[in-house]
Structures are given as C-alpha cells and as structure tokens.
Image (spheres, grey):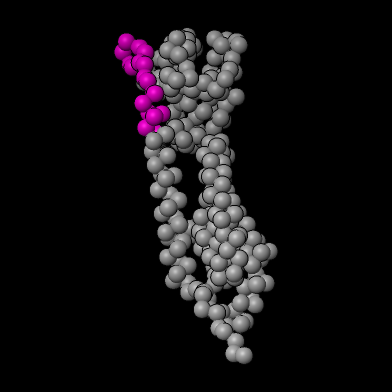
Amino acid sequence: MENRIPRRKIFKDKTFWVGTFLGGPLVAGYLLSENFKTLGQPEKVKPTWIITIIATIVIFSGIFLIPENINLPNQIIPIAYSIIAYGLFKKYQEEKSNEYINSGGLIHSWWRVIAIAIIGLMITIVPVFAIVYASDTIEQASISTKTYGLDLKHEIAFNEKNISEQEIDKIAEGFRETGFFDSSVAKYVYADKNEDKYEISISVIEGIANDKNALQPFVELRSQMDDFFPNNIIEFKLTVDYLDNVVKVLK
C-alpha cells in the first residue's frame, strides 16, 4: 500500500520564538492551534484559543498595573511569553511534529510566520492603544488647575476625582507658609491622593537627583509639610519635563 504524503504544513519550533516575540501571545495561540489541526487534534484547538485569549488579557492588564516607579526593560515581557509559547510547543507538539515532518509533511515558510506576526501585532496593539487613549482622555477631563499668588501665578494641577479643592487650598497654604510659593519664581505642582497619602509632583531641573545640595531644600520642605497634614503621608515626586519622568522620590 502506498504511503500518503501529508499536504498540510506545520510550524516548527523556532517559529514560535520569532512569531510570538514579534506578534504577541495571540500569535502563539494561532501557531499552536494550526499545528493541532495539522496533527489531527482538532479537539485541542478551542481550549488553546480560550487559554490564549485569557492569557493575553491577563498579560496586558498586568502591564497597566505595573507601578510607574518600576522600570522593566522593554524586552522582558515579550521574552517571557515567547519562552512559554516555545515550552508549550516542546511539551505538546514537538514529538508529533517531528514524526509529521519525517513522514514528508511540509513546513510553513518564514514569510508566512512574519506575516502572521505582523497581523497579530496589529490585532493586539490597536485595542491597547484605544484603551490607553480613552483612559488618558477620561483622566485629562478630570484634571483641574488652581493658581495662587498675586504677582506670580503658582499653579497646582489636581485630579478632582480623588482630591478636593479644599485639600488643594491646604497644600497651597503649606507651600505659602514654608516659602516655597514665593515671589521669585513661579512653581508648577501636580497633586494626587492615594488613600491617606498625598503624592505631590514638583517640576525641577535636570541633574538634581544626584545633587545633595540642590535636593536639601526639597527634603526640608517635605518635612515641613508634615506639620500641615499630621494625619496624612506626604510624598514628593521630583520630575523633569513631564510627570512620568520621576527622577527622585522623597518620603
């Protein structure tokens, strides 16, 4: 009896590294599910997609929950889920894939893998960018600003959803009494509240984080602000150019 040569193509081990790293976890689910079809295991396709979608949601939700003061290299998370995808292939498909190839089965080209990775990346990043844009729009809509001082307009921006205008006035009073809100240079401050902690971001010049003499006035100011909020924690975030660029945290 003549052996039939398999006509469907399969994805090999290295394609899981490249495809998943470039295209994200959804690409890993696609590669695994397509291999299960080729290997005659269609019953494993649906569970593979369910797990993939849940994992994708968990991964990107976790990324948004990472604190701002934790700086992870950009490659860490893609490398992590690429390792997982490769491990799943090794455990559930490698043996049967080798048998399939040895029996004459064909292998998908790298061009197809790259194309799938690009499509997977687009499917992943479009909703992520949409969520980020919507979140920023909502957050910006909640930002209010108050100015203090007759000559110079010292400015305090705040999120009115979690901190009241009365609290902002109290912060401004503390800055005025300590001399931070003076008549020489206009100051810009962003105030936020996290439970009983006031997180106050202050714009500073670049290089201050490593200059003890330049930092000392802010250390003293932070300590003095405790007198105005004895029942709260005061935390200063010294920023350069924009709020997310925190160069020093004073607690």
Q: Is residue 200 above or below residue 93?
A: above
Q: Residue furthest front?
A: 1
Using the rendered view, name the quadrant where residue 129 is placed.
Answer: top left
- Residue 62 in picture, x, y percent from top left: 56, 41
Q: Is residue 22 left or right of residue 12?
A: left
- Using the rendered image of the protein, determine whether residue 216 is visible from the camera's viewpoint: no
Residue 138 sits inside the magenta stretch:
yes
Camera-side residue of 213 and 44? 44
- Image point (45%, 30%), residue name: 204
- Residue 100 in picture, x, y percent from top left: 61, 77
Q: Which residues are magenta?
A: 136-153
- Image point (52%, 74%), residue name: 9
- Image point (48%, 58%), residue name: 23
Q: Quadrant of the N terminus?
A: bottom right
- Residue 219 in picture, x, y percent from top left: 56, 22
- Image point (46%, 61%), residue name: 117
Q: Residue furthest bottom?
A: 1
- Residue 72 in picture, x, y percent from top left: 56, 46
Q: Is residue 166 left or right of residue 16?
A: left
Camera-side residue of 219 and 94? 94
- Using the rendered image of the protein, determine whether residue 251 is visible from the camera's viewpoint: yes
Using the rendered view, name the quadrant where residue 43 is placed.
Answer: bottom right
Q: Is residue 111 above or below residue 64?
A: below
Camera-side residue of 150 and 22? 22
Camera-side residue of 147 and 116? 116
Q: Quadrant of the C terminus?
A: top right
Residue 40 sits inside the magenta stretch:
no
Q: Residue furthest left?
A: 151
Q: Is residue 247 left or right of residue 157?
A: right
